[in-house]
Amino acid sequence: MAISGIEALLHLLSEFGVRHIFGNPGTTELPLNDALARDFRIQYILGLQEVPVMAMADGYAMASGGLGVVNLHACCGLGNAMGQLYNAFREGTPLLVTAGQQDRRLRFEEPILGGDMVAVTRPWTKWSAEVERIEDLPRAIRRAVQTALTPPTGPVFLSLPLDLQMERCPSLDLTPIRLPDHRVRPPAAALEQAADVLAGAENPAILAGSRVTERGAVDALVALAERLGAAVYGESGAHHGRLAFPSDHPLYCQGLPLWSPEVRERLWPHDVLLVAGMDLLRQYVYHEPARAIPEHVRLVHLDESPWQLGKNYPLEVGVLGDTAVSLAELERALARRMNDSARASAAERLTARAAQRADQQARLREEIARQRDQRPLTPLAAMAAVADVLPPDAAVIEEAVTTTNQTLERLGALRNTSGYFGQRGWTLGWGLGCAVGVKLAWPDRPVLALLGDGAAMYGIQGLWTAAHHRVPVTLVVFNNAQYQILKIGAQGLHLPQAAAGQFAGLDLTGPEIDFVQLARSMGVEAERLSDTDQLSGRLARSLHRDAPVLYDVPIARGIPERLQYG
């Protein structure tokens, strides 16, 4: 029986286990929406604009560990989505992004909506192609899915001409999508060399990144860190995407600072660094000294991408292979090498770090107590109120770095590693949509999004999708009526007017945004909260309700001298 191009797409994706397509349609996508009107295997999640659409698919893919599928409207819809595609590219999120292309019979005339979308998307995808023949469509879909999901994972793009979507063919090869086992064991010699370097270290540390969590390697990393008694640092707040180590573990030292001089200071006491599952390093703003890793530090780097090994810093040992397998086998190699003296030193480091961590948390709680009665709420007091009621299985999406400030991690309040999602690409508008996608992937887990007011406005249309599909996410907008991160950055660059406290285009006033009315206009219940007890009480209830809710929380509008870490 003849089958159309769009029917072939839906058949292959549904057989592979895809249950949602995130989209905003236009004329060149109508064959998909028409097919879904009678094909209920896949649910179409409608977004009102491409920023939240892409962010929803991103969150869904990260939480589920599977493929996120997006359908966009030709060149114009793709253009709106490009910032969020950049986020997915920086995260390595496995997305299949599709867009309708103009009818092939019109292409030579340079019609409206048509254009070279392949060239546009190629820099921020693993693979990008336009399907010219219906006979090639199944092969293109299988290739795209395998490419997206094979480490190093990432987004792919397919351009689908309108007439190809409707064209029917009696002999398409609909062989199911089958992925090869991508787990590659590291070379034994490289592991042995890495174990030798780490076993001989006097003060080792570990730099752990998002790919540790995404490859299911957290337990292996914990065992290795405890074996070494090594301090564990997460990625900098500029790209701190997933939580690679338990936040309540005594060896956890939170994320690295933002700027290279502070990173050097933090890492200076260590003689060997083990880097696992992170890009070394992805800096944000140029500072001198520009080299963030001290020259005396020897580097051992494990990753699944050869591009990351030795990219920015020369290595003592580079280990290419599956993250979980590499960490587990390295831990066993260390167990064979470490003598009684080395094991005693590791135990001493762990004990010392536990005492240091307890002292830091005690001082942090004292500072929280001093700030609790200030109004408007300080960021620290507001985050402590969140920490007080955060369930152990909660998923937390952060897009408010100057407010959240790693407080949940510093308090040890993130009690699971899988449920943390932070910005990595910094195209704003990601957090709200990401939360909706995470909740669709994890309907039984409470999902909380912590958003800055400026960031929220980039993807605010996602509120309608949450209401329309009744996705019960809890959204907290920390409202300081400004782009505070840019004011901090301007002062960090020693710009003369910023140093004097004068800013142009960085305040969200005249008028201020009424998030309560804005949310209600799109069908989401909303309330303004100004007290810590009120915030804790509302969150404790809303995280278990069956409909979305937004809380607008006014916070202090000053500019902190610096962001705190550790």
Image: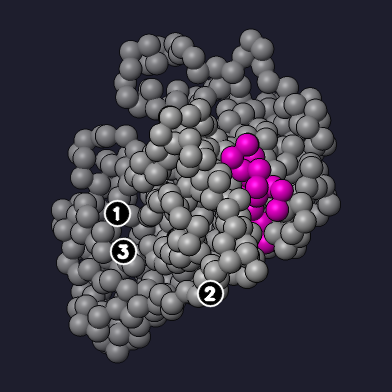
Earlier residue among tags 2 and 1: 2
Q: Marks 1 and 3, how far apart in space?
A: 12 Å
* Rendered residue at 45%/13% (across/down): 503
* Rendered residue at 36%/46% (across/down): 122
Amino acid beneath label 2: Thr
Amino acid beneath label 3: Ser
Picture quarter with the N terminus: bottom right
Q: Are marks 2 and 1 in contact (CB under 8 Å)?
A: no
Residue 280: mark: 1
Name the residue that disc number 2 marks: 175
What is the crowding at mark 1: few (fewer than 14 residues within 10 Å), some, or many (at least 20)? Answer: many
Residue 5 is at least partly visible in this image: yes
Q: Are marks 1 and 3 in contact (CB under 8 Å)?
A: no
What is the crowding at mark 2: few (fewer than 14 residues within 10 Å), some, or many (at least 20)? Answer: few
Question: Residue 50, percent across and down?
Answer: 58, 37
Could you tell me which secondary element the residue under label 3 belongs to? loop
Q: Nearer the viewer, mark 2 or mark 1?
A: 2
Q: Nearer the viewer, residue 253 or 106?
A: 106
147 to 398, vertically: above or below: below
Name the residue that disc number 3 marks: 305
Q: Could you tell whether 238 is left or right of 447 in the image? A: left
Q: Identify the image quadrant of residue 3.
A: bottom right
52 magenta-colored: no
* Rendered residue at 69%/47% (across/down): 33
Q: Marks 2 and 1, how far apart in space?
A: 40 Å
Question: Residue 432, percent across and down?
Answer: 64, 41
Q: Could you tell whether 385 is left or right of 119 in the image? A: right
254 to 518, vertically: above or below: below
Q: Nearer the viewer, residue 401 or 159?
A: 159
Q: Which residues are magenta?
A: 18-35
Amino acid beneath label 1: Leu
Earlier residue among tags 2 and 3: 2
